[in-house]
Image (spheres, helix red, strand yellow):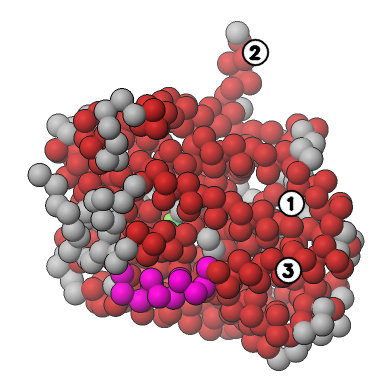
Amino acid sequence: MSSTTSIHGMWSSRLAFILAATGSAVGLGNIWRFPYTAGEFGGGAFVLVYLLCVAAIGIPIMMAEIMLGRRGRQSPINTMCTLAKREGATPAWQLLGWVGILAGFLILSFYSVIAGWTLAYVVQAGSGDFSGINADASAAFFGDLVGDPARLLTWHTLFMIMTVLVVARGVASGLEKAVQFLMPALFLLLLIMVIYAWQAGDFGAAWVYMFQPDFAKLEAHAGEAMLSAMGQAFFSLSLGMGAIMIYGSYLSSQASIGRNVVIIAGMDTLVALLAGMAIFPIVFANGLEPGSGPGLIFQTLPIAFGQMPGGSLFGTLFFVLLVFAAWTSGISLLEPMVAWLVESREFGRPLAAILAGIAVWLLGIACLLSLNLWSEFTVWGMGILDLFDYITANVLLPLGGVAIALFAGWVMHRQSSEQEFNLKPGSPFYLLWRLLIRYLAPISVILVFLDAVGFLDIIIEWI
Ligand code: PFF
């Protein structure tokens, strides 16, 4: 018999769940990571592969993750352990929860540093520092920030405190209300930015760049590009580490999972595309380099705010909203480990949140130092921050996703998943999901992995 509620609280409504899960999905991944990663891989072809990954891999895995969470009603580690036993499988499936905790830990440590950049930019935009700024000055501005460990530490610390405060109170209480106004406001502001970029930037060039796939641009590093597009889909949809699973564990048993997932993934994708349409026109109009890396939006947007009427106000508002978007994602990154500490170590929620927060904060210091004092220290040509970003998005999250797909599609009995989806036996939606989760999603992820390490080429040649 499965429980119908979680000890950590429940969302007050279906809308609350949609808002919280969208809050987790929409964040720096859409507005900071998507444009610069698309830029690094030359635009359109990457965007197309990304969209395919969202539809064919992301959506079915998100449905599976929510379904597992709701059936287990505990932290991902304990959920996987309980469900595995119930389905007659080995409790070693809880490893999935542990890898998820590790991924969440690594992601939040660098995520908080980037969210710190956003906080710093709120203050800069508010004090009118961007007015009339050109591309060189904007780049210098960004360079000053990332070169200054003390400033980075201050903002990283503030972001971690904000995140711990909410998680300590319980996500179901504070988060719902915040996201309710945040999401529409962020949407509106992004639209304003797109309209501005359309008027003042090179919209035509940006459109061609993003939506006319030029596969020749991928040829040189197709494997790497596909891996990055898939990693971006996992990262942006918050999949593969238990964040969406735990949010699913607070969802009422009556809600329809399929419909909710389509809404959440749709909004997440829309925000990413809007961010691209706001940024690339400005990039092209100012002769900037779309593939310039993680500083892209932080060097581009100030130029737009510096030129547009009312730019200080818009700029401040924009970065405030981006902080909120990052905050609601950061909360979901911390929640799985805190829930586990509460369940299994019997800590009170505030203590659990503080301890987990301190651990992440410490690791975040290594990330921020990798931008300046420790920049010489690299692994595979990447500093610590870039390394954590690469390993989590491109390896750990997709691996977690495959494990979720295999468990939901092969280990779990058909009656169990059918019952959890509240669908009639033989429903076409269920059959489609089952096909995707058993075959298409895991096989695609594995092929992309094999392709990225060059294994596929060897096999093809051999055949
Ligand atoms: N989806 C978030 C973003 O796009 O910013 C980041 C994220 C949150 C990744 C939660 C993974 C996760 F589990």
- In three-dimensional space, the C-alpha distance between marks 2 and 1, rounded to whole angstroms, equals 31 Å
Looking at the rendering, in which quadrant would you find the C terminus? top right
Q: Nearer the viewer, residue 437 or 138?
A: 437
Residue 39 — which label?
Answer: 1
**Residue 204 at what x, y percent from top left?**
86, 52
At label 2, the amino acid type is Glu
* Marks 3,2: beta carbons within 8 A: no
371 horizontally vs 428: left or right:
right
At label 1, the amino acid type is Gly
Q: What residue sits right under mark 2 in the picture? A: 461
Tell which tag, 2 or 1, sits nearer the viewer.
1
Q: What residue sits right under mark 3 in the picture? A: 193
- Residue displayed at 39% across by 62% down: 15
- Residue displayed at 14% across by 52% down: 3
387 horizontally vs 157: left or right:
right
Residue range (magenta): 172-183
